[in-house]
Amino acid sequence: MPLSSNETIRRQLGRACLALIAGAAATASPALAETVYSDPQAIGEGVVKIYSDFEADGTPNAIGVHMSRGALDGLPVAMNNTTRCFDKNGNGAIDPHGECAGDYELSFTLPPALTEGGKTPFGWVTVNWNAMGHMAPAPPAWGVPHFDFHFYIQPEAEVRAIRTGPCAEIIDCDDFATAQRPVPARYLHEDFLDVGAAVAAMGNHLVDTKSPELAPDGPAFTHTWIYGAYDGHVTFYEPMVTHDFLVNEPNECVPIKAPAAFEQAGYYPTEYCMRTVQEGAEEGLTISLETFVWREAG
């Protein structure tokens, strides 16, 4: 039956409204990414804080450490002889050279938007300053002033429960044995090796055997990647970066050597980046995990 003129007009208006709604939906701005910063903590003559950049649904873009201008100046030049120490020779005194791990540590918790619902496996971060580098059994190349940036998978309470003692790098001998339980091969890139570098309140450090500074007559150490392990599990991700490299205003991203499989599902980074921020409120340096990819468990 032919439509009345009023009905024709009503339907035409309806179609026009639907077209406007569809057009608006097509051109609407997507939900904006958000960057969340932790409270700052003092370091050197500046501050350090953790930042997390993620989409509205919690998908991570970057998890990193921000160091302000001045953070690399005025740092301690002697080893820390108050934490992670053990009287190995039983003389009733602590010798920081051989009886202390020697690092200074700041600890931060990641925001719930990243950690809830298994979006990433990471829960907290530490920034560790090693004023005199690492002692044996760590490779000699790493005996220079540097930072360790630990992005932890293992819960903090479990990490803090790893005791000090006379084995390896000031770790309880039973805990050292636990730290050396091998990670299943599918969860670890083939280039990484256990060199016995287990530390109290931290865990074992698995070394990239192809890191250039470890080669005979290799270049000076600038930065490298470490996988943390404990009780047969990967427990942290760690970029290790020298003070000299950071003061020279780096802008570099490096691919992370990934394993064939992952023990738990989540978004994992595929590169770590060291950048200089030249201007604005966040002027300084960033050391970050980036370019996250979803990985299924197993």
Image (cartoon, rainbow, N blue to C red):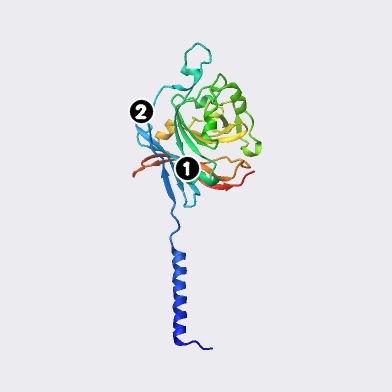
Query: Quick check: can you spot residue 208?
Result: no
Q: Judge depth for marks 2 and 1 and give the one in front.
A: 1
Considering depth in this image, is 268 or 153 the residue closer to the camera? Answer: 153
Q: Residues within 10 Å of mark 1 (few under 14, many from 20)?
A: many
- Which residue is at a point 51% across and 16% down the rendered structure image? 87
Read off the residue under disc 1.
Answer: 63
Q: Which residue is mark 2?
A: 74
Question: Residue at the location (51% across, 88% down)?
Answer: 2
Asked if residue 158 is positioned above or below residue 31 in the image, the reply reads above
- Numbered badge on residue 93: none
Give coordinates of residue 122: x percent, y percent: 52, 40
Within 10 Å of disc 2 (Cα), the crowding (few <14, some 14-19, many 20+) is: few
Amino acid type assigned to the residue bearing label 2 in the image: Gly
Q: Earlier in the sequence, mark 2 or mark 1?
A: 1
Which quadrant of the rendered structure holds the N terminus? bottom right
Relative depth, front residue between 154 and 281: 154
